[in-house]
Image (spheres, helix red, strand yellow):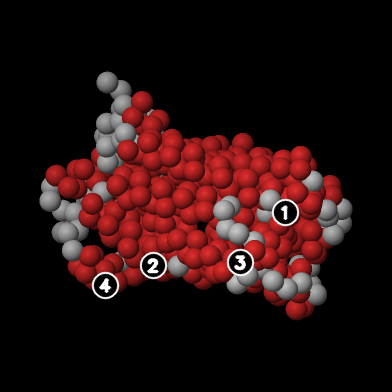
Amino acid sequence: MGSEQPQPPTVETDPPPGVLKRAIGASAIGNATEWFDYGIYAYGVTYISAAIFPGDTEEQTLLALMTFAVSFLIRPLGGLVWGPLGDRLGRKYVLALTILMMSGATLCVGLVPSYDTIGLWAPILLVLLRMVQGFSTGGEYGGAATFMAEYAPSRKRGFLGSFLEFGTLAGFSLGALLMLGFSLLLGDEAMHSWGWRLPFLVAAPLGLVGMYLRSRLEDTPVFRELEAKGEKEEQTTTQFKDLLLGYWQPILRLGGLVVALNVVNYTLLTYMPTYLEKEIGLSSDESLIVPIIGMLTMMIFLPFAGSLSDRIGRKPLWWFSLVGLFVAGTPMFMLMGSNMLGAVVGFAVLGLLYVPQLATISATFPAMFPTHVRYAGFAIAYNVSTSLFGGTAPAVNDWLAARTGNALIPAFYMMAACVIGAIALLKMPETTRCPLNGTAMPGTADALPPVALEPAKT
């Protein structure tokens, strides 16, 4: 066989600008709603734990963090259900259902009576609602990232995909700012009594807006093309077989990358207020201000990191992030332990080192699977790894720090996760500017070749 000639870059037709903007907005607002819940729960954990759980302050905090982790333990079940449905029925229908479930459950958390009112039913109801949130989230993030990636032109997938994570930080920051704002406005006594509930009530209008935006869009061009060719998966059992037999390697790689991604994510964004208050000794308000400043700074750099990945590739940015976090983890946590200014600077440095990972999730992960199993492969691999290592990170960090008395435990945990991510990254194919169409794995010889960096002249 003679040597193959290099294929010319694929020519793509971009969606109309208005449609593309609505697709980005519909994806991002769902992600913002999901992370809005995580933000208000994580940043209001002191109030929630005192209202809902029995015991002393330390026991209440640990129970609240364990309840936070419960939603993640149920996420793989959500991925198993929503992922295959998204590949069979379409992305938009599943995403409309998941955002309604997520926002409805978040609203109900704010309505749960206190432990003093109904006793053990209070934590039981909270756990059940967290399970509903975890089940819906099992389909929300993988679907939103897939929806975004399949709508975005290949040459701009990194840049446009970064706005999904902009929504992540926007939702998280909004939740944190609301909790901080009500705390400053109402005072500690009112917050413990009833004020902590108010931010949860905002989830309902956010969810309705997200559902409206998603219902106005057609399904992704990539999915409609597959459906027109009759190549989409029709049976869930067949799809699971295809995944396990044909795609176990990308499932393991994605799972390893998610270990690094989410241990860092939930340590920095979710556990940090508790850590700064308990281990460093900052006030409850100061412990909210530090990550809020860091997240707002990260939001500025997300689109730049996404755009850079379209030019130089996803893997170089991931290597920079993993190595940087491994090297800087311990010294930055030591700096955070010095004073308020050190906490702001240390968090900002770690946050900016994390940005290259965060900015490229929805460009990198969906491209690890072909279209007919993309939603399911992404949702299952992402959620299993997240449930084991991401959502449990706050509780694991809190437990280990309390047992060892070592305030640097979160840094060590992050460093170990980065090592696992680096191992997974070694064998990941580079898929920058590769089209996601068809049933071949993007970035391989059987798939469409990458598109040109600049659009073709007409």
Three-letter amino acid code of the residue under disc 3 = Ile
Q: Which residue is mark 3?
A: 118
Q: Earlier in the sequence, mark 1 or mark 4?
A: 1
Mark identifier at residue 77? 2
Whether label 4 touches label 3, CB < 8 Å = no
Q: Is residue 270 left or right of residue 282?
A: left
Per the image, label 3 sits on a secondary structure element best described as helix
| Residue 153 figure quarter | top left
Three-letter amino acid code of the residue under disc 1 = Ser
- Give the vertical position of 271 relative to 399 (above or below): above
Q: Which residue is mark 1?
A: 193
Whether label 2 touches label 3, CB < 8 Å = no
In front: label 3 or label 1: 3
In front: label 2 or label 4: 2
| Residue 109 figure quarter | bottom right
| Residue 64 figure quarter | bottom right
Quarter of the image for the C terminus: give it.
top left
Q: Residues within 10 Å of mark 3 (few under 14, many from 20)?
A: few
Q: Earlier in the sequence, mark 2 or mark 4?
A: 2
Q: Residue at x 85, y 59 (%)?
A: 281
